[in-house]
Image (cartoon, rainbow, N blue to C red):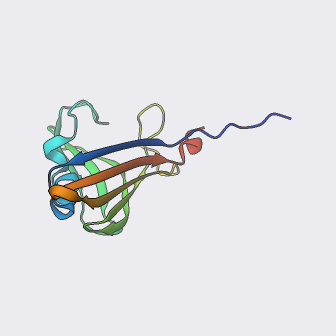
Amino acid sequence: MSLMIKPAPIRKTVSVKATPQRAFEVFTTGIDSWWPRTHKLGSAPLKQAIIEPRPGGRWYEIDEDGAECSWGEVLAWDPPKRLLLAWRIDAEFTFNPDLLTEVVVNFTPEAGGQTRVDFEHRLLENLG
């Protein structure tokens, strides 16, 4: 009998000089300002990265050729505290609607006008 080893979630924490409201806004509706242009699914260059600001909203890219490529959807939208996204991109970096890993981002106020941003990509065992 073999045991499946469950991979640990990927976690990252940073502090930013912004209110939780501003940090949430930059991370979500401002995603296109910081998302790496190389992290995309389509064959054309990335034109825009978008998170629709609501539960059930899409998380996707629009490429310079007009193609739209889904990445997943918004599972929870709780500004300025928490964002939960379904990540449906497999290990080969292609969209798979049957795959579910989750990206959760929490925004916590800190002293001095800072916000702690805790990022976790979990359920990685679903990648196979």
Residue ranking furthest to the front: 111
| Horizontal relation, residue 67 to residue 7: left or right | left
Residue 102: x, y in percent? Answer: 45, 52
Dividing the picture into quadrants, the one containing residue 110 is: bottom left
User: Would you say 100 lies left or right of 114 here?
Assistant: right
| 101 is higher (above) or lower (below) than 73 | above
State the image quarter where residue 62 is shown.
Answer: top left
Horizontal side, residue 98 vs residue 76: left or right: right
**Image point (25%, 66%), residue name:** 80
Quadrant of the drawing holding the C terminus: top right
Residue 49: percent from the left, percent from the top?
21, 46
- How many badges with numbers are in the image? 0
| Residue ID at (47%, 45%) | 96
- For this orientation, the residue located farthest to the right is 1
Quadrant showing the N terminus = top right
In x, y percent, where is residue 89?
43, 42
Q: Is residue 21 found left or right of 59 in the rendered image?
A: left
Residue at image position (17%, 59%) is 25
Residue 71 horizontal/vertical position (percent): 35, 48
Is any atom of residue 29 visible in this view?
A: no
Pick whichever, 119 or 16, lies toward us: 16
Residue 1 visible to the viewer: yes
Q: Is residue 8 above or below residue 31?
A: above
Q: What residue is shown at x 30% (from left), y 51% (from top)?
A: 117
